[in-house]
Image (cartoon, grey):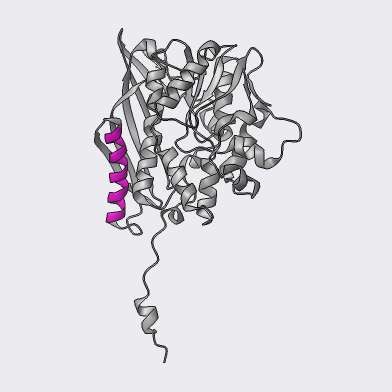
Amino acid sequence: MNQTSPLAATAPAQPLRLTSLAHGGGCGCKLAPAVLQQLLAGHPAAGPYSQLLVGTETGDDAAVWQVDDNTCVVATTDFFMPVVDDPRDFGRIAATNAISDVYAMGGRPIMALAILGIPLDKLPIEVTREILKGGASICAEAGIPVAGGHSIDAPEPIYGLAVIGLLKPANLRRNSGAKPGDALILTKALGVGIYSAAFKKGELSAAAYDEMVASTTLLNRVGADLAEDGAVHAVTDVTGFGILGHGLEMARGSGVTLKLRLSDLPFLTQAERLAREGRVTGASHRNWTSYGEGAVLPEGLPDWQRHLLTDPQTSGGLLVSCAAERADALLAQIKAAGYPAARIIGAVEAGPAQVVVS
């Protein structure tokens, strides 16, 4: 007769891994640019709405509606599946990522609505509470309430926010305003997707995990401050399409060439080693397939370095195009505001809409 051993009967249950419940995670869940273009092909234009200052034209970070001469409303939504296993960290990362779109447009958030999908048969209520608490803590840090939301029973965990913000029309910063002669600044280090790939395989150190969470929960609130400076011409946040993809959106929207210096790009401390070891996401491959024709890379660049450029960033930094003569002062301002990884990474030139890496 088979009997359960006392040891087996009292063995502690393995902790639930949120990432095991999802087929993807973070901004790596985004549809590839080529797929998104196919879905939106033939999509009706937003219409002749004179007050709609930003719609879908250039793949910008949020929609902007002008209410009157002094006020614009900024509206965005962002949500994804877990990129980490700690529920509170997941909530914090997702909320930071969603709020970023408002800052990237030059706005300041005023409130958020929660978006929640939970597999009720797999996820304990207390875990879901921690996700919500994590998101609410970041909203509190941003000075806004979670004023409501919507929830469903879903096969995979999903969390994010719809965020509303305000800005003055003069402070609106699109991704399409880069000018030849501008300098390019990036406010956060790259490599989040590479770290998340290593994390899923159980190969990310505790120190690297802490580094990733610190970066992905750092609010991009400096974007609203930068928008008050006339020397800042264009801003976008770098998320699921990587620095190459979001740089290409800026290049195409502005009708210019973006030149990035690979040696000046900031990376999380272990990103290059992990990339060499093949710790890359499927989204990185999909990104290159989608927009590789719009990028010019150094001849003979190894695949692992290309993956650093296409790596999907969850809650990444801001890519800022600004007057070259003000770049050093703006960089100092950004670093003083709490973004130590910020770097001047390249320049804008007249030329075809592409990204050139040297």
Q: Quadrant of residue 225?
A: top left
- State the image coordinates of residue 332 (x, y, percent, origin top left): 46, 21
Residue at the image point whose x is 37% and y is 26% from the top: 221
Residue at the image point whose x is 64% and y is 12% from the top: 350
Q: Quadrant of residue 1?
A: bottom left
Residue 49 drawn above or below residue 214: above
Question: Does residue 133 show up magenta in the picture?
Answer: yes
Seen as rendered, the residue at the extreme right is 300
> Which quadrant of the rendered structure holds the C terminus?
top right
Asked if residue 33 lies left or right of residue 78, the reply is right
Residue 50 visible at all? no
In front here: 304 or 247?
A: 304
Question: Does residue 175 show up magenta in the picture?
Answer: no
Residue 136 drawn above or below residue 122: above
Residue at the image point whose x is 47% and y is 23% from the top: 60
In front here: 120 or 316?
A: 316
Residue 120 visible at all? yes
Seen as rendered, the residue at the extreme bottom is 1
- State the image coordinates of residue 197 (x, y, percent, origin top left): 54, 49
- State the image coordinates of residue 273 (x, y, percent, origin top left): 62, 46
Q: How many marks?
A: 0
Asked if residue 305 lies left or right of residue 339, the reply is right
Our reading of the magenta stretch's main secondary structure is: helix
Seen as rendered, the residue at the extreme top is 69
The magenta span reads 126-141
In front here: 84 or 28?
A: 84
Residue 91 drawn above or below residue 330: below
- State the image coordinates of residue 96 (x, y, percent, origin top left): 38, 36
In front here: 43 or 296?
A: 296
